[in-house]
Amino acid sequence: MADSEATAGATPPRLWSHPRSGRDEALTLVAAGFARDLGLETLAKAVSVLWNPRMRTAAGRAFARDWIIELNPRLQDLPEDRRDAELRNTFLHELAHLVAFARVGRKRIAPHGPEWRQACHDLGIPGEDRCHALDFQPRRHAKKFAYTCPACEAVIHRVRRLRRRVACYPCCRKHAGGQYDARFQLRETRLD
C-alpha cells in the first residue's frame, strides 16, 4: 500500500501539539524568541507558558508580575479548521500583554490600551480584538438550597448553605431601619 493511501483516512498531525496541563516548553521557547526579537531580554529570560485546566471561560491570561501566560486547554479541542489560528492568536494576544508591561516598566497601563495595541502590531497581529469569540461556557452548579422570608415570602436560591443567620434585607430595611431583625430570618429548604 502506498504512503498516500495509508494516510488518506488519517487525521493530519496537529501543528500545535501541547500538553493539556502544566508548563509548555515549546511555547515558552517561542515566547522567549519573540521577546528577544523585540529587544526585551529580561522578559525572554523570565517568560513561561502554562496550560491551566481550571480555566473555564477565558481563552488565556497574562500575569505581568510573574511573566506567565496561561492558556485554556479547551483551545486544543476546537475544530481543526480553527484550532491553529485560535491557539496562535490567543498566545500572541497574551504575549502582547507581557510585552506591553515589559516596555513600560512599573507604570500602570490599560490592559488593552495603546501600549498593548502597539505590542500586538509588533507581534504580527495588528487589529487584534480584546475578547475572543469562542463559546467557552462556564460551569453551572445546581442550586441546592432555597431561603424564604417569612414576611414577604421572597425566595433566594443558593448553591451553598448559609453559615450564619441571615434576614431578608428589604424587610429589615422597611421595618427595622436596616438592622437585623429575627422576625425576617430566612428559612432554609433543601432542594433535591
Image (tube, rainbow, N blue to C red):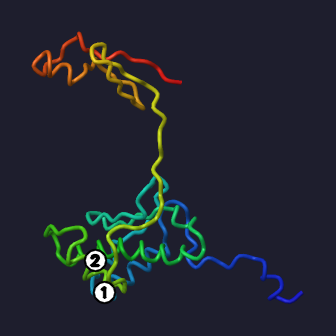
Quarter-of-image position of residue 145: top left
> In this view, which residue lies farthest toward the front?
152
Quarter-of-image position of residue 32: bottom left
> In this view, which residue lies farthest toward the top?
183
- Residue 128 placement (x, y as % from top left): 34, 78
Q: Which residue is mark 2?
A: 99
Q: Which residue is mark 1?
A: 122
Q: Quadrant of the N terminus?
A: bottom right
> In this view, which residue lies farthest toward the left?
177
Element at badge 1? helix
Amino acid on which the number 1 mark rests in the picture = Asp
Residue 117 vs residue 157, the one in the foreground: 157
In the image, what residue occupies the spot 17% across and 69% down? Answer: 109
Q: Are marks 2 and 1 in contact (CB under 8 Å)?
A: yes
Which is closer to the viewer, label 2 or label 1? 1
Query: In the image, is residue 137 above or below residue 85?
Result: above
